[in-house]
Amino acid sequence: MSPAQEAEQILHLAGIESAGKLVSYSPIDGKSIGRVTTGDPDRACARAHEAFRVWRTVPAPRRGEFVRLLGERLREAKPVLTKLITLESGKIIQESLGEVQEMIDICDFAVGLSRQLYGLTIASERPNHRMMEQWHPLGPVLVISAFNFPVAVWAWNAALAIVCGNSVIWKPSEKTPLCAEAVMVIVRRVAEKFGDAPDGLVQLVQGERDVGEALVDDPRIALVSATGSTAMGKAVGPRVSQRFGRVLLELGGNNATIVCPSADLELAARAILFSAAGTAGQRCTTLRRLIVHESIADELVTRLKTLFASVKVGDPRQPDTLVGPLIDQAAFEAMAGVLGDHEVERVEAGSGGFYVRPAIVEVPAQEGSVLRETFAPIVYVLRYSDFPDAIALNNAVPQGLSSSIFTNDLREAELFLSAAGSDCGIANVNIGPSGAEIGGAFGGEKETGGGRESGSDSWKAYMRRQTNTVNYGSDLPLAQGIRFDVAP
Ligand code: UN1
């Protein structure tokens, strides 16, 4: 069946009408698979603001019930949503399944969190005084998501924002609008079952750049959580900061793996293949730089070349495909542009999509395109002789998302994780840089934007902290022992 026919069936099943200005194309064959209507940012912000005023007073564990129902519905919808993700983003089925699982996992996490939005109690220096801090809902949250994780990253943000008492507006990538429509069908069913969720608690606003800009600039949006390129973050960050709104940025990565002489090369090779070639190199956590000790570089590169050559590139709906198509022609041109003389190996998959074989390119120095994130499956190989140089190379790029090391030497591993080691938000030992679990805080430093989403205490970004001091005595002692008495 063609992607268009398959998509039509799914949209019909979900009751989604395919109409409107914005066209969705499947990267599988480059053809249109549906249309959606552009949203109205002003109306969405007004509704989100009203919904927030109601939702913030609902007890957090009850808000958790909304997310529990969402997780339950996602479990039921997993097979269908998986298919649509593959049709619209070009991910292989295994990875689309993983993407829906990531949504379910964050729902489970957020349900537990809805009873754990803890503040501290703090010892007061004054007699008969108590200090504490409370975490209150923040306001409407705008989630801008990218094509490569068309639904999971929205879920990371939405699940936390909802239990934290906020309303949510979702501006998905214009390359994956149908996945967002399908998730909204699920959300509407959840709202019905929940009963008294305010109208406009979760909204979808489709559109292109102008729609995104109007939402970003709206003062009713308290937090803009944006995932995408560093260029996008550079545009969004200052606009929001200028109106003193909050931003949570998850931008480009240029992730490295260091392979040391003591490494288990079999393990390393498998991890490198998944991290570099998985999602056709289109994850923000994709492995882009391999920093290998000179004593094992030849052996590892030979092994990797064989693996890269044997990987099946093709229709992502086939169970044995490991690398699906690039998202579009522009992605292909970007890859071809940086590979230049090395030439991109195009794979004919019997359709109009852009299918490429993952490339492994040895470079003498870390310069030029090696310093940039090209959203395609290219891994650059650099050699090192002294371990401190490997760490220096890992850090000598403008981005700071993810990193990893393969070693069986405890000293190397611990140094890599230490304050003098990797400067990234994520640093792993004996696994690749991609494929993080939702339980940890996800995000990175430098040009990656500094935001943290998903697990750990990332929820704090979606709330406002209030410090309270209560005097239960009948005197008025001042802090720092200040005396301020009126003369008798
Ligand atoms: C992204 O590419 O924007 O760690 C997110 C990973 C995934 C999320 C990637 N869990 O690779």
Image (spheres, grey):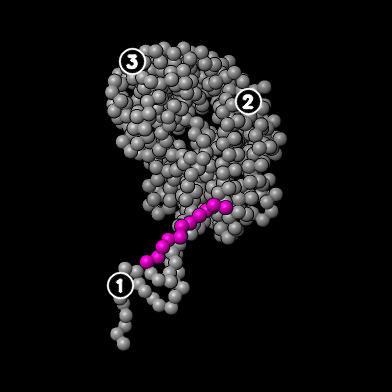
Q: Label 1's element? A: loop
- Indicate which disc, 3 or 1, sits on the residue closer to the N terminus: 3
Does the rendering let one see residue 446? yes
Q: Main secondary structure of the magenta part?
A: loop
Q: Is residue 65 above or below residue 234?
A: below
Mark count: 3
Q: Which residues are magenta?
A: 115-125
Q: Amino acid at mark 3?
A: Ser
Q: Position of residue 57 (x, y in %)?
A: 58, 60
Dot 3 corresponds to which residue? 295
Depth check: 322 or 123 in front? 123
Q: Label 3's element? A: loop
Please tell me in which quadrant of the rendered image residue 154 appears. Answer: top right
Q: Quadrant of the N terminus?
A: top right
Which numbered disc covers residue 482? Answer: 1
Q: Is residue 249 above or below residue 388?
A: below
Q: Residues within 10 Å of mark 2 (few under 14, many from 20)?
A: many
The residue depicted at 37 percent of the width and 25 percent of the height is 409
Which numbered disc covers residue 3? Answer: 2
Q: Position of residue 179 (x, y in %)?
A: 60, 36
The residue depicted at 60 percent of the width and 30 percent of the height is 97
Q: Quadrant of the C terminus?
A: bottom left
Q: Is residue 192 above or below residue 8?
A: below
Depth check: 240 or 249 in front? 249
